[in-house]
Amino acid sequence: MIKIGTALFEACEELEREKGITKDVIIASLCDALVTAYKKTIKQKEVPNVEAILDEQSGEIGVFRTKLVVEKVEDPDMEISLKDAKEIDDDVELEDEVKIEVTPENFGRIAAQSAKQVITQRIREAERKLVLDEFMEKKGTLTTGIIQRVENRNVIVNIGKTDAIMPQKEQIPGEYYKPGNRIRVFVLNVKETSRLPQVIVSHAHAEIVRELFELEVPEIEDGIVEIKSISREAGYRTKIAVTSNDPEVDSVGACIGPRGSRIQTIIGELKNEKIDIVRYSDNPVEYIVNALSPARIVSVDILADDEYSKEAFVIVPDDQLSLAIGRDGQNVRLAHKLTGWKIDIKSQSQAAKMEFAPQPQHNDQPEEEPVDDETDEIAEEIREQEEYAMDEEDMQAFEGDEAAEDAVEE
């Protein structure tokens, strides 16, 4: 037997405190290491009846070989005579199994080297499994971390037992990430690697907005007010659709709070990101009108509403076109993400000039009516304008309405 003493158990307790690896894992790793070292000593790869045993009371560990007690020994590696077995244990009988110590002399140094390698590997494996299990449970949730450093445009965030990576596309544009600052992030993905699992987090995810509203608006946490949808362009603007399950509670007013206190707290947390609170409706026309706020809407025509496509044609006053579209198409783009409807916006003057007016399509319509060449050319021209590109006239109107847009949003 090899004398270990109390140092091993003290090290086990320390590892359990620091890394969460139990003492049983360390002891099992040590025993496996001794068996591996013993096999190398006797130069045999397969020794099925060998095990290492640790006596915690005496602090000794040794290698033992299990043999079957027989009357006549035919395989010395697997069997032992009754006479020899009696020298080990007086109470042993035929067909019993006895454990015989086979720890080699001067085995301590060899065992220590092997044990160091095996234990180190097992500790890494155990630590990796613990981290993987923990963050697999956190996947799709929010957590708080501390910014460590910025490396190749990636932000490294410590979120407990490991460092997570925030790629550039998951960062808020223009945000300065200072090492040492606390940050709330969304766990996007956990990738299993040969070393510690790689955790990918986001600071631009829409779920961060959801959690902030749940923290600041008690009605949402209680289920009275429900968040139906969120569309976000981090650092710039967010639209959030809400509805109330209680007719006496105003969903929009609850989110804004007394004198705007709740919404202002959330805006401050998001570094002054603009937030539009939209009233959800089962009526798609009403929902689209609300989603395009703060712009005024003249009419909404439903062009297609089925499982394959949802399209709407919206007409706005001439002075509201730039506001409805938004800077670089942001307002209509967020409205599309929020509602799930493809929205084509035209001003009243543009709609009046159109010889081809979009007609609502119904699921029971057998097939489309043929169109002549002239109408087909006009339709092609309309499709080319679908990306909401603003012409020079619209850009001038947008510059004139920019101040009005900011005032309405505030």
Image (cartoon, grey):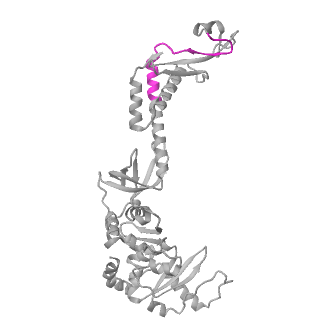
Q: Is residue 386 visible?
A: no
Of 246 and 7, nearer the camera is 246
* Residue 394 x %, y %: 38, 85
Q: Is residue 25 visible?
A: yes
Say whether residue 390 is left or right of residue 66: left
Q: What residue span does the magenta drawing correspond to?
A: 91-118
162 within the magenta span: no
Say whether residue 141 is left or right of residue 359: left
* Residue 109 x %, y %: 43, 19
How many labels, in total? 0
Residue at the (53%, 79%) spot, across then down? 283
* Residue 344 x %, y %: 49, 81
Of 46 and 206, nearer the camera is 206
Q: What is the residue that sits farthest to the front in this orientation?
A: 248
* Residue 312 x %, y %: 53, 81
Residue at the (41%, 61%) spot, across then down? 211
